[in-house]
Image (cartoon, rainbow, N blue to C red):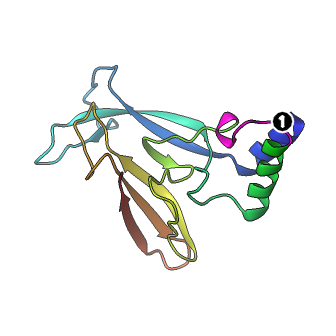
Amino acid sequence: MQEVDKIKQKIVKKATVFETGGFKPEYTSTESWIGKVYLLKPFPLRPQPTRDDYPVWDGGGLTREMEVEILELERSGIIESYYDITENQYGHKLGGYPSFCQPGVYFGDNFEFVFQIASDDKARLNIVDSGTMYFAKNAITGEWIFYCDFY
C-alpha cells in the first residue's frame, strides 16, 4: 500500500467544504449563506475546512504519468478502482479540485480553480439539471472565468 499512499500524497489538495442542514443558523455577520438573494430562500452554510480532495478521474487534475501509475495499480490488483483510494468533494467548496459532471473541461492557461457552487436539495437550489457552477482565476491577469455543467 506504500505505492497507493505515494500517489495519494502527490495529488491530494485541501478544500473547505460548505454543508447545508443539520444545524440552526446563528445569524452572525461571519455566517455563510447560500440563496440569500431575491428569488431563493436563504439557507445557512457550515464550513468544514481542510478535507482531502482528489480530482475526478476524467475531469482534469491528473497528469498522464499519474493516470498510468494508477492504471498499473489496477492492472496488478493492488487496487480495484481509482475511486477505492480517493474521494472527491462534490458539493459547495472552496479550493481542492473542480467536480465536473462532464469530462474534457479546461479553464485555460494559467487559470486555477477557486470554488464551486453545487445544486443542493436542502437549500432548494437546482443549477439547470443537478449541475454545478465553477469559478477559476487567472494567476497572471487576475481575470475570472465562470463555467457551468450539468447532467
Q: Name the residue nearer the viewer: 21 or 141.
A: 21
Q: Residue at x 27, y 30 (%)?
A: 122
Q: Residue furthest left?
A: 38
Write down the residue under mark 1: 78
Name the residue type under label 1: Ile
Quarter of the figure with the N terminus: top right
Q: Residue furthest bottom?
A: 141
Q: Quadrant of residue 58?
A: bottom right
Q: Is residue 141 left or right of residue 121?
A: right
Circle 1: element type: loop
Q: How many marks?
A: 1
Q: Is residue 72 left or right of residue 97?
A: right
* Residue 136 point in image, percent of width and height: 46, 64
* Residue 69 point in image, percent of width and height: 81, 52
What type of secondary structure mainly makes up the magenta span?
loop
Local crowd at mark 1 within 10 Å, few (<14), some, or many (≥20)?
A: few
Q: Which residues are magenta?
A: 76-84
Q: Name the residue nearer the viewer: 15 or 61.
A: 61
* Residue 54 point in image, percent of width and height: 62, 46
Vertically, is 64 above or below 127? below
Vertically, is 42 above or below 71? above
Q: Residue at x 32, y 43 (%)?
A: 119
Q: Name the residue nearer the viewer: 19 or 122.
A: 122
Is residue 131 highlighted in magenta? no
Q: Quadrant of residue 51?
A: top right
Q: Quadrant of residue 6?
A: top right
Q: Residue at x 51, y 54 (%)?
A: 98
* Residue 11 point in image, percent of width and height: 71, 50
Q: Is residue 45 left or right of residue 140?
A: left
Q: Residue at x 11, y 48 (%)?
A: 38
